[in-house]
Image: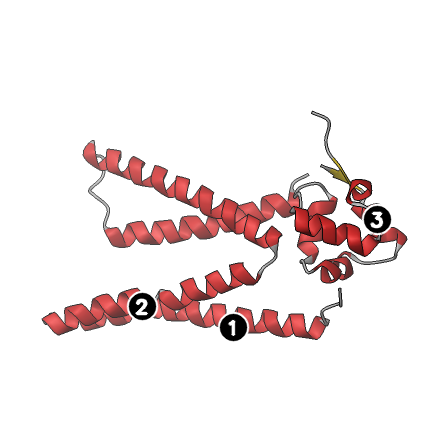
Amino acid sequence: MKNRLRELRTQRNWSQAELGSRVGVSRQAIIAIETGRFDPSLPLAFKLAHVFGVSIEVLFEADER
Amino acid sequence: MPLQKPNIRLRKAVIGFYAWLAALVFAAVAPFVALNVLEAGTLAARSAAVVIGTIGWLPLIAVITHIIRAGDEFNRGIHLVALACAFASALLILMVLDWLSRARFITQPSLSVLWMIFALTWAVWIFLVKYWFEHRA
């Protein structure tokens, strides 16, 4: 699953650790999501979208099958 | 959502580390204590050895369970994958050892060796899965 996490995070000058704290996960989790190694659960995806003030569709994009 | 203060997170991490370390030491010492108790050979001593040998691992299991439950979904995911891989590996190791001993290449391994191998397999898989998630290109 593609995402715009890094783009939106750097726009706000947030570190990975800071974003992790805002949504209640570790920095490693943010790194893994940003690099596409880990797909977040729906509740976490909603939290991430909420802290960025965007809809979940803006933040995440499903891979073409 | 409010930011969690770094010093609170650090304190939790330090407490968790020391709890894990203490539990690990307890688990490592317990078998030796149990073996010493076992030497007495009486029914009471044998029973005590079983209890001490088993109880020694409970704090470690409790601490690890707490660490996994306290972690985020990424951390839990790592442990879930590691546990699945460790179980499959342990089963494979068990089958290989069984067939090696049936074919008389080795003598039947003791249960003490087996549970140590299984514990080690679990630890190795946690390390490997963590590495895979955090460093995969």
Q: Quadrant of the N terminus of chain A?
A: top right
Residue lying at 56% horizontally and 74% vertically, measured from the top left? B15
Is B31 or A27 nearer to us in this picture? A27
Gap in angstroms between the C-alphas marked 2 and 1: 19 Å
Q: Which residue is mark 3?
A: A54
Query: Are labels 2 and 1 on one chain?
Result: yes
Q: Residue at x 33, y 68 (%)?
A: B56
Q: Which residue has dot 2 on it?
A: B55
Q: Could you tell me residue A30's position as x and y percent?
A: 71, 52
Return the x and y of residue B114 as percentages of the image width and height. Answer: 30, 49
**What kind of residue is marked 1?**
Tyr
Alpha carbons under labels 3 and 1: distance apart: 41 Å
- Is circle 2 on the same chain as circle 3? no
Q: Residue at x 15, y 72 (%)?
A: B45
Residue B104 visible to the viewer: no
Amino acid found under the numbered disc labelled 3: Val
Left or right: B35, with A22 as reference point: left
How far across and how far down the image is residue B117, in percent?
Answer: 35, 50
Residue underneath mark 1: B18
Left-right relation of B93 to B4: left
Q: What residue is at 62 percent from the left and 45 percent from the top?
A: B133
Nearer to me, B128 or B77? B77
Indicate the chain on which mark 3 is placed: A
Q: Percent position (x, y) of residue B5?
A: 72, 72
A24 or B119: which is nearer to us? A24
- Which numbered marker is on residue B4? none
- Is A29 located above or below residue B22 in the figure? above
- Amino acid of disc 2: Ile
Q: Quadrant of the C terminus of chain A?
A: top right
Label 1 element class: helix
Question: Does residue A12 lie above or below A32 as drawn?
Answer: below
Instruction: State left or right for residue B42 relative to residue B68.
Output: left
